[in-house]
Image: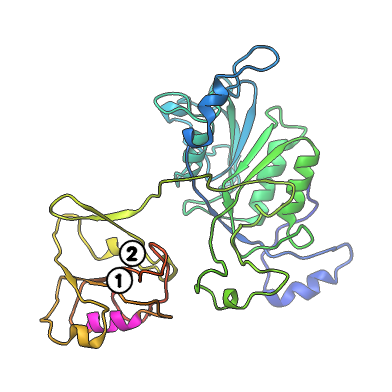
Amino acid sequence: VFNGVSLQVPKNKNDELRSLPGVKAVYPDQVYHADLADSVPLIGAPDVWSKHDQNNQGITGKGVTVAVIDTGVDYNHPDLGEGFGQGHKVVGGYDFVNHDNDPMDDYGHGTHVAGIIAAHGKVTGVAPDASITAYKVLNQDGIGYTSDIIDGIEASISPDNPLGADVINMSLGTDSGFVSEVDDPIQKVIREATEQGTLVVVAGGNSAYSTQNNLLQSSLKPYAENPDIGTVGEPGVSPFALSVASYENSSIHMSTLKEENGLQLPYQDQSQYNFNLSKVLSPLESYELVYVGEGKTADFKNLPDLTGKIVVAKPNERYATYSYIQSEAKKKNAKAVILVPAADDIDYPLVYWSPYFNIQAVT
């Protein structure tokens, strides 16, 4: 489905490569990340199971092979057949990261995805009677490259593969990719696979780098022909992919602090700065929360030393940055900062902080 080679060369050699006879194009080997979502009842799968096909068979995925192109699959999991090969749930696959015949998952994401698709045990997937082929293209950190993903797609639909996929699932993507197959070989491969009769399902991404927030300067002044930036991931933007994102999801997974009275306080780590509250807090210790109003200099002025305590601030309005709270909290030796967004802001926003103040901040 794709005629090319993967090379590691200095960037200043790209033009030289393009000038070689027979070279049609040179593409960057993009970095892709695992994407995650749930859940089975949310999409109405139990209603489908109750129906029957033209042969009066239940619609449970029986006879269908789904290629999971991801971080691999833990085929020893009791809900995924406890084995690998013919006669098991995971009937085959390949590891394109380590270049061997064992697509064991060393990250967890591919196993989660395979469970959503076809788990059959204590947990029931969307298509519990479907078979899985596992193609590991993402490493132990959930990261992979264009070339390995293309290899995974090609292997899953190869005419030489007796376990050819009816469906390909790729819960992966990047929000810094291209919008057409002219610049993106993965989208070309998706088209080829689709035209050969395989349904290709790709994560939508939900990255939300949109014109409705101030996370990126470029999103504040978008091009007229591209008014929204990075909301849908690539290769999910391919017109030949079934791009899937959250569907009427009423729940969200959050990290939480727990008050002594049992109240759960969810918070959003500020991952754009690698801020993670669990890095500085211990689950075996208690921490006092100190409310500091808007978190301005005057709000901190009469406060004692805040060593080991967590500062909680709630501005009356939205600001371009909240590093001023970090600055004042740092002067008082606070452990961390929790920002409660202004009334006109969204819940759990990703906002501008300073990476230079050595103090963790969340919302």
Q: Secondary structure at mark 2?
A: loop
Question: Residue 11 colored magenta?
Answer: no
Magenta segment, prevailing SS (helix, strand or loop)? helix
Specify whether residue 129 is in view: no
Residue at figure coordinates x 66%, y 65% from the top left: 8
Pick the front one: 160 or 254: 254
**Residue 210 visible in the picture:** yes
The tag earlier along the polypeptide, 2 or 1, is 2
Q: How is the image coloured?
A: rainbow
Outermost residue toward the left?
Answer: 304
Q: Quadrant of the C terminus?
A: bottom left
Q: Which residues are magenta?
A: 323-330
Rendered residue at 62%/17% (across/down): 52
Which x, y percent locates residue 178? 69, 63
Read off the residue under disc 2: 276
Would you place residue 303 above or below residue 215 in this image? Answer: below
Q: Is residue 246 left or right of residue 167?
A: left
Residue 18 against residue 149 in the figure, above or below: below
Q: Residue at x 44, y 44 (%)?
A: 108
Amino acid beneath label 2: Asn
Which kind of residue does numbered mark 1 sit on? Answer: Gln
The quadrant where residue 218 appears: bottom right
Circle 2 residues within 10 Å: few <14, some 14–19, many ≥20: some
| Residue at 45% over, 26% down | 82
The secondary structure type at the circle numbered 1 is strand
Residue 179 falls in image quadrant: bottom right
| Tags 2 and 1 touching, CB below 8 Å | yes
The residue wearing badge 1 is 360
Residue extending furthest right? 21
**Considering only vertical position in the picture, is 200 above or below 206?**
above
Label 1: few (<14), some or many (≥20) within 10 Å? many
Q: Nearer the viewer, residue 159 or 185?
A: 185
